[in-house]
Amino acid sequence: MKKIFVLVLILVLLSSLVSASTRDVIEVDGLRIVDETSTSITRMEVIVSMNDLSDYDLDNVMVTTMIPEINVFHKIRINLEDLDENRKSFYVDIPRDISKGEYPVRFMVSSDDTKRIKYRYLVVY
C-alpha cells in the first residue's frame, strides 16, 4: 500500500513539474507611478518592469490599470520581445475634476495563463 502511495505521489509531482514548465510565467520586477503625489493631474505616467520566465516568448501581455473610485480603466498590450531592458512606460488619462485624497490603483499584468496583481496609490492634494 505504501509503495502505491509513493508511486502516485511521484507521478503527481512529475506531472505538476511538466505542466508548470509549459505555462506562461511573468515576473513583475517593478511597477511605479511617476509623480504619484500631485496637486493637479490629468495624465498619470506608469513604468512597469517585467521578465518572461516561460519556455517560449510571450508576445501578448496585457497591463490593465483600474482606479474604480474615479472611473478609470485603461488597457495596454505589450510585446515583451520589443521592450528595451524589459521596461515599458505608458500614460493613463485621469479626470480633471477629481477631489483631493488617496486613490488605490490596481494594476493587473496578465497573459493567457498567468495573472499578477499589484497595488499602488495615487495621492491628490
Image (tube, helix red, strand yellow):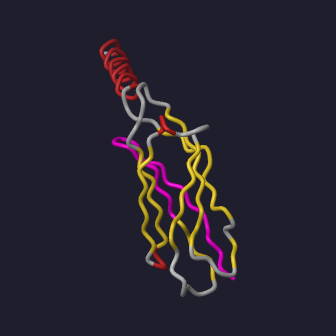
Magenta stretch holds residue 119: yes
In the image, residue 59 above or below residue 71: above
Magenta stretch holds residue 122: yes
Q: Front-most of 11 and 68?
A: 68
Which image quadrant: the C terminus?
bottom right
In the image, residue 9 above or below residue 41: above
In the image, residue 64 above or below residue 19: below
Q: Front-most of 76 and 15?
A: 76
Kindly give the residue lying farthest to the top in the view shown.
Answer: 3
Q: Front-most of 6 and 40?
A: 40
Image quarter of residue 58: top left
Q: Is residue 26 left or right of residue 33?
A: left
Q: Position of residue 99 (x, y in %)?
A: 58, 87
Q: Residue at x 69, y 76 (%)?
A: 38
Q: Residue at x 63, y 82 (%)?
A: 101
Q: Position of residue 95 (x, y in %)?
A: 51, 80
Q: Is residue 69 left or right of residue 31?
A: left
Q: Position of residue 118 (x, y in %)?
A: 54, 56
In the image, residue 25 above or below residue 121: above
Q: Which span is picked out in magenta?
A: 106-125
Image quarter of residue 14: top left
Q: Residue at x 30, y 15 (%)?
A: 4
Image quarter of residue 50: top right
* Dominant secondary structure, magenta: strand
Which image quadrant: the N terminus?
top left
Please give the count of numbered marks on the rendered protein. 0
Q: Is residue 23 left or right of residue 124?
A: left
